[in-house]
Image (cartoon, rainbow, N blue to C red):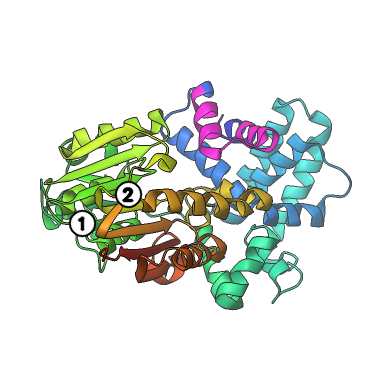
């Protein structure tokens, strides 16, 4: 059943273009999978998505002619198991794929699936080389990223740097948490959870695995989930007790929580989001963490009122290319859609900047490494807003910093003369 569930999820993703997490959750629920079966189905689905182009390349080396879409999905799942799941014997990957083919009504393709996967399994240590080594096209296939994305990365980081980022995108994402220092200490929390400190960010811990939401420490509000880069963004903004802080596009709430903890739960953190359903995540998290200064309200960031805040945190909608290892389907979004984002980001940044009072700060951040969404946006903003000046700018990289890909730009509003 896990393999059938993964195959159905691949079909829905391919057919409907829905977000992978929504697809997976829906199919797992439909088939009633739990525990190890649900975990295996998820690993197969997300792992295949991460390596789709590479799986297709090897399939093309051994299968001739046009393949039914569902048969191709079955082959993709089989190739992924053979190449990336050492605990599954090749024989099991082949036989289970053949069974799945027949159970889905493709008896005539069972022989093809058997032959192709047996050959790939038999030649696993000597498979055909991906062509074009040293080129963007080679990296695009090897790491299953679109060519345009690979080319942009090479322009920013060079060939070796781009390959390092792409490799990180296909790794399992670590789970990082931040200590609620109003309730416990990082040392006590690390000992209770068996977690390891993240160097350079006090109170940031990496969890060893498992369902942390059932732990007494989580239920008692001793920590919240947040990547180190997002935490460092709030640290760079430097919220202080007694400040009035606005967090636009706040859901799911990590930056609001980080600000409230840094402010020792004194002052005000106004958390806003355009989505009521997403804002409920912020409210629930604030209640669990016992952060009383967080006030949630549904509002479009374009409606930001003038001049009332010491700090405005603007983590705006972006392409999300820095979190591909958490959301592998992001790599399959249309480039034309992503290229329209800077226009929206510029509009929103213009609007939320009105909320910064003289002498206050504005923090612009995204979870992407694209220059057109980062430096290009903030540079254009600063040129047209001489009342603001840049005081900090940084891009975080998964291969260098061990974090999500992330960009921050802190700007200060000058005191009015």
Q: In which quarter of the image is residue 204?
A: bottom left
Q: Give the range drawn in magenta.
A: 8-29
**153 relative to 286 in the view: left or right:** right
Overall secondary structure of the magenta section: helix
Disc 2 or 1, which lies upstream in sequence?
A: 1
| Residue 17 falls within the magenta-colored stretch | yes
| Residue 80 falls within the magenta-colored stretch | no
**188 relative to 321 in the view: left or right:** left
One can see residue 81 in this view: no
One can see residue 278 in this view: yes
Q: Which residue is drawn at 68% across and 62% down?
A: 148
Q: Residue at x 78, y 29 (%)?
A: 106
Secondary element at image label 2: loop
Residue 3 image position (x, y, % from top left): 59, 35
- Quarter of the figure that contains the C terminus: bottom left
Rendered view: 400 above or below 49: below
Which disc, if any, is residue 355? Answer: 2
**383 relative to 294 in the view: left or right:** right
Rendered view: 246 above or below 395: above
Residue 388 image position (x, y, % from top left): 36, 65
In the picture as drawn, the residue positioned furthest to the right comes out as 65
Residue 57 image position (x, y, % from top left): 75, 57
Which disc, if any, is residue 239? Answer: 1
| Front one among 28 and 205 | 205
Camera-near label (2 vs 1) is 2
Residue 241 image position (x, y, % from top left): 12, 53
Rendered view: 117 above or below 202: above
| Front one among 351 and 226 | 351
- Quarter of the figure that contains the N terminus: top right
**Residue at mark 2 to residue at mark 1: CA–CA distance:** 16 Å
């Amino acid at each position: 059943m896990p393999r059938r569930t993964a195959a159905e999820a691949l079909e829905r993703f391919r057919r409907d273009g829905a977000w992978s997490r929504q697809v997976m959750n829906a199919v797992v629920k439909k088939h009633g999978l739990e525990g190890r079966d649900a975990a295996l189905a998820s690993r197969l689905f997300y792992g295949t998505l991460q390596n789709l182009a590479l799986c297709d390349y090897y399939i093309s080396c051994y299968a001739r002619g046009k393949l039914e879409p569902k048969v191709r999905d079955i082959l993709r799942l089989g190739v992924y198991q053979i190449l990336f799941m050492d605990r599954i014997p090749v024989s099991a990957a082949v036989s289970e794929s053949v069974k799945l083919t027949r159970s889905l009504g493709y008896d005539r393709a069972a022989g093809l699936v058997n032959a192709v996967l047996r050959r790939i399994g038999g030649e696993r240590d000597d498979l055909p080389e991906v062509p074009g080594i040293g080129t963007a096209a080679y990296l695009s296939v090897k790491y299953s990223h679109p060519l345009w994305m690979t080319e942009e990365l090479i322009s920013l980081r060079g060939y070796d740097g781009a390959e390092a980022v792409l490799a990180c995108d296909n790794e399992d994402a670590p789970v990082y948490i931040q200590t609620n220092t109003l309730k416990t200490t990082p040392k006590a929390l690390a000992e209770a959870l068996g977690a390891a400190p993240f160097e350079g960010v006090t109170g940031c811990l990496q969890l060893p695995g498992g369902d942390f939401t059932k732990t007494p420490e989580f239920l008692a509000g001793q920590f919240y989930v947040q990547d180190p880069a997002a935490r460092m963004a709030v640290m760079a903004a430097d919220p202080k007790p007694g400040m009035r802080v606005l967090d636009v596009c706040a859901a799911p709430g990590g930056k609001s929580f980080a600000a409230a903890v840094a402010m020792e739960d004194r002052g005000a953190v106004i958390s806003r989001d355009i989505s009521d359903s997403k804002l409920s995540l912020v409210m629930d998290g604030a209640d669990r963490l016992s952060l009383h200064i967080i006030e949630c309200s549904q509002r479009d960031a374009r409606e930001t009122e003038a001049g009332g805040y010491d700090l405005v945190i603007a983590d705006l909608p972006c392409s999300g290319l820095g979190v591909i290892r958490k959301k592998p389907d992001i790599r399959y979004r249309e480039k034309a859609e992503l290229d329209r984002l800077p226009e929206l980001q510029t509009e929103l940044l213009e609007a939320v900047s009105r909320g910064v009072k003289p002498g206050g700060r504005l923090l612009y951040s995204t979870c992407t490494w694209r220059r057109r969404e980062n430096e290009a946006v903030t540079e254009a903003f600063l040129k047209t807003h001489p009342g603001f000046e840049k005081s900090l700018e940084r891009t975080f990289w998964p291969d260098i910093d061990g974090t999500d890909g992330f960009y921050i730009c802190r700007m200060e509003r000058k005191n009015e003369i």
